[in-house]
Amino acid sequence: MTTLPGRHRLGRTLFAAFLGLHALIHLTGAANGLGGAASPQLTHPISATVGVFWLIAAALLITSTGYVIFRPQRWWIFGAAGALISQMVIIMSWSDAAYGTIANAIILTGALYTYLTWGPRSFNAQYSRDVDQGRNEAIPSVLLTDADLADVPLVVQRYIRRSGAVGQPRVRNFSSLFHGQIRGGPSQPWMTFTGRQSNFYAPSSRFFLMDAARVGLPVQAFHRYTGSSATMKVKIASAATLVDARGPALDDAETVTLFNDLCVFAPGALADADIRWTETDAHTVQAVFTHGTHRVTAALAFDADGDLTDFTADGRAAMSADGKTLTPMRWSTPLSHYRRFGQHRLMGRGEGIWHAPEGNYTYLRFVVDSIDYNVTELPQETPRAPLSPAVELKLTLGSAVGGKA
């Protein structure tokens, strides 16, 4: 399970308190209509029938408050129903309760955003379906041995051993969490982001979901690679589509990324992959990776200790600023800060660099928060990028569900 950073916990708590207060106000209306104590805020009588609806609205809002705390991705169901019934009874007592319309507008805005972000057609739902399907595959218990590395260059063998993969079950999937910064070009501002990723092998697939903030609004990008074809979609506020890319150029680009993931996050799986190796010198190898009809040629550089320090390949494509065209160019990922993740030892920090005609520039900086192998179920909570306090309030709980910085 991931944990919420302080600001997101605070935003969730404040919104839960807001819902609870709105529910208490409706309880006073219910008490007025059902023969309880009169409220000084309600100067006009409420019938018993209408009082029942005030009570139903209160019950739904109280239920949504509990969901905000314990199951935030689903709070919108009860919150929206409670707000709609609340507005109905407010209209019946308009002169006394008109101000409640503002509260209901906030609740419905947050409910709509949460539905778009976590509902059945959202990127989050698609990611969960894809990952669940991949995790339905049986996980073999066969261990990786030194003998399995016989056809791998010595420097790569050393890297695999240093990663702790030898003696561990062969990797059939991994799931990881990240955070960092990303930008669309050398002159564009950096955006903070969090990401979650799940890769599967035999057959291979890759699912990467990133949450970021751009000019104060949430942006979500979903990379999906199955078989040998890929799609990349980007939405702002989970509603407006900014990018919807697919086609041969993207397939080639995502295959480069698939191979990079294999080298960086699943070194032990290199022994099973379709790779032709050529030793360049004691610290560098060239690798030709074949996946279906796609072929990727990359240079892998290692330091004196045997850790992978860089991966460079052609064929990956940078997206244009308008999100409409892909331009293939050289791409590299310097790696550093190796550390332990359970039984495995991997890089902890990395960068993404475009080798553009006008000059190289870093467009990605990231930190690996966690990585797990041969996973059989999703964590109970998933990460979300930090947003500005103004957006947290404007979009209410919708922008505060399930975050990790």
Image: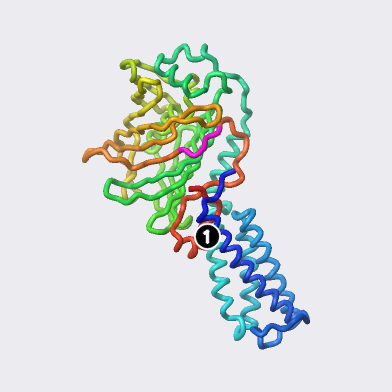
- Magenta segment's dominant SS is strand
Tell me which residue sits at (52%, 32%) in the image: 341
Identity, as a three-letter code, of the amino acid under mark 1? Tyr
Depicted 392 relative to depicted 58: above or below: above
Q: Position of residue 266 (x, y in %)?
A: 49, 27
Tell me which residue sits at (54%, 15%) in the image: 145
Depicted 10 relative to depicted 150: above or below: below
Q: Secondary structure at mark 1?
A: helix
Residue 284 is left or right of residue 234, and the answer is: left
Depicted 79 relative to depicted 136: above or below: below
Q: Residues within 10 Å of mark 1 (few under 14, many from 20)?
A: many
Is 231 or 342 nearer to us in this picture? 342
Is 10 or 302 nearer to us in this picture? 10
Tell me which residue sits at (48%, 19%) in the image: 161
Tell me which residue sits at (65%, 78%) in the image: 89
| Quarter of the figure that contains the N terminus | top right
Q: How many numbered discs, if any? A: 1
How is this picture coloured?
rainbow
Depicted 148 relative to depicted 222: above or below: above
Q: Position of residue 120 (x, y in %)?
A: 58, 52
- Tell me the quarter of the picture where residue 264 sits: top left
Question: Residue 194 colored magenta?
Answer: no
Q: Which residues are magenta?
A: 368-372
Q: Position of residue 281 (x, y in %)?
A: 31, 16
Q: Position of residue 96 (x, y in %)?
A: 62, 84
Which residue is denoted by mark 1 in the rendering? Answer: 113
Residue located farthest toward the right when viewing the structure as drawn: 35
